[in-house]
Amino acid sequence: MMVKVALISGSLRKESFSTKIAKSVEGLFPEGYETQFVEIGNLPLYNEDIDTESNVPAEYTSFRNAIKESDAVLFVTPEYNRSISGALKNALDVGSRPYGQSVWDGKPAAIISQSIGNLSGFGANHHLRQSLVFLNMPTVQQPEVYLANSSKLFDGNGKMNEDTAQFLQTYVDVFIDLIKKHRA
Ligand SMILES: Cc1cc2nc3c(=O)[nH]c(=O)nc-3n(C[C@H](O)[C@H](O)[C@H](O)COP(=O)(O)O)c2cc1C
């Protein structure tokens, strides 16, 4: 049975470095693992008033199903004003409800943060961790992945530089260990 890993990028823009990093990471998973990129840009802002059986937006339902069907989740987050993007927070909120039916509960997670400057999304990385603690997602602790100067990670053909790819391979390997422990 394939182990399914959902990949979520916290950025909606077409040329997003978070998304490019997520796409590069896809190739680092070993045999037996299947990655699925899950979109968050189509999710209406979370509102309990519309999240009722007769009203629930179809986008909420398909997003929740995609996460439910996944065994683990890898987040690649940009930093917006020292935190995660509103889009990513909204996706966390949508998946966490209705109360008692969170689709995140117990799923192993991994976090990559990035920024185009030197700070590498530290604030976003840790704000995301804060939510994942409450959502009860066992998350890779070490190594931590903060990618700085993300616009310089790729060559003209969109290929990630070798050093970064190797580091991310180490990270994915640790994530796989966490997933295996969790499934044992
Ligand atoms: C609203 C907004 C806020 C931002 N705030 C930060 C920030 O706090 N720290 C940082 O390092 N970069 C910040 N940036 C710059 C992002 O690192 C940069 O736009 C990056 O490319 C976003 O990720 P993406 O390429 O995946 O869209 C901000 C960008 C936007 C649009």
Image (cartoon, helix red, strand yellow):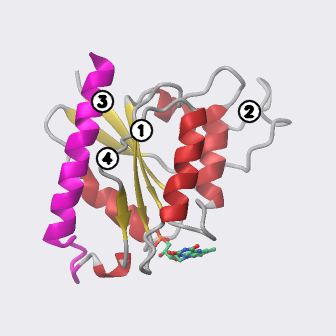
Q: CA distance from mark 2 to mark 1?
A: 29 Å
- Residue type indicated by callout 4: Gln
Q: CA distance from mark 4 to mark 2?
A: 38 Å
Give whichever of discs 4 and 2 has the lower sequence position.
2
Front position in the image: 76 or 159? 76
Residue at image point 26% right, 51% down: 26
Local packing at callout 3 (Cα closer than 10 Å; few below 14, some 14-19, many 20+) is many
| SS assignment for the magenta stretch, majority | helix
Local packing at callout 4 (Cα closer than 10 Å; few below 14, some 14-19, many 20+) is few
CB-based contact (under 8 Å), mark 1 and mark 4? no
Give whichever of discs 3 and 4 has the lower sequence position.
4
Which residue lies under the disc numbered 2? 56
Residue at image point 43% right, 61% down: 113
**Circle nearer the viewer, 3 or 2:** 3
**Circle nearer the viewer, 3 or 1:** 1
Local packing at callout 1 (Cα closer than 10 Å; few below 14, some 14-19, many 20+) is many
Q: What mark, if any, has residue 139 been given in the picture?
A: 1
Q: Please, is residue 142 above or below residue 184 in the view?
A: below
**Circle nearer the viewer, 1 or 4:** 4
Which residue lies under the disc numbered 4? 142
Task: Please state the quadrant of the image where ligand 1 appears.
Answer: bottom right
The answer to whether residue 156 shows anywhere in this view is: yes
**Circle nearer the viewer, 3 or 4:** 4
